[in-house]
Amino acid sequence: MRLPRERRIRASADFARIRNTGSRLDCGPFLLNFKRGEGPGPARFAVIAAKKSLPLAVDRNRAKRLARELFRTDPAAFPAGTEVVLVIRSGMLRRRLADLRKVFAEAARRISAPATGPSA
């Protein structure tokens, strides 16, 4: 099953904007670059699987399928307007899907929590 077009990040400029102005969250088997949005639209998602971390195409494709499945099965995990880019690390394929779901859910909870800054 494919993510609808409005839920995908496709433009190179969007990837660069999220990486440069967004936040980063290290989750172990993957890294999340995200930008909290204010818009009413649904959360948007993209996956990056680098050849350096997963040299075999079959492994990169499997990791991308797993990542999309994590996002697709929990559509309300991220607030509306949030843009998320998941960067796959080599350890992702050594984890069970249930473990990845727990890590992903915890990351979504941390991203959804209100940002707390230093109080004056």
Image (cartoon, rainbow, N blue to C red):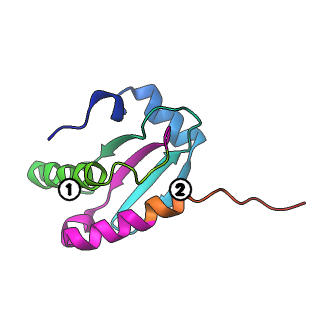
Q: Quadrant of residue 10?
A: top left
Answer whether residue 91 is magenta in the image.
yes
The answer to the question of whether label 1 and label 2 lie on touching residues, with beta carbons closer than 8 A, is no
**42 versus 56 height, above or below:** above
Q: CA distance from mark 1 to mark 2?
A: 22 Å
Left or right of 112: which side holds 73? left
Name the residue furthest left.
Answer: 58
Q: Is residue 43 visible?
A: yes
Mark 1 highlights which residue? Answer: 66
Please report the bounds of the magenta region as a residue range. 80-106
Q: How many numbered discs sit on the rendered protein? A: 2
In the picture, the disc for residue 112 is 2
Residue 59 screen position, x and y as percent: 13, 55
Task: Determine which of the numbered discs, if any, sits on residue 31 in the image.
Answer: none
Q: Amino acid at mark 1?
A: Leu
Can residue 26 be seen in the rendering of this structure? no
Give the residue displayed 15% in from the left and 48% down from the top. 61
Query: How packed is label 2: few (under 14 Cα within 10 Å), some, or many (20 or more)?
Result: some
List x then y, in percent, for residue 95.
22, 72
Was residue 82 drawn as part of the magenta stretch in this picture?
yes
Instruction: Give how far across and how far down residue 104 sits, in percent.
Output: 36, 63
- Looking at the image, which residue is at 39% across and 64% down? 105
Q: Which residue sits at x=49%, y=47%?
A: 79
On-image quarter of the C terminus: bottom right
| Badge 2 amino acid | Ser
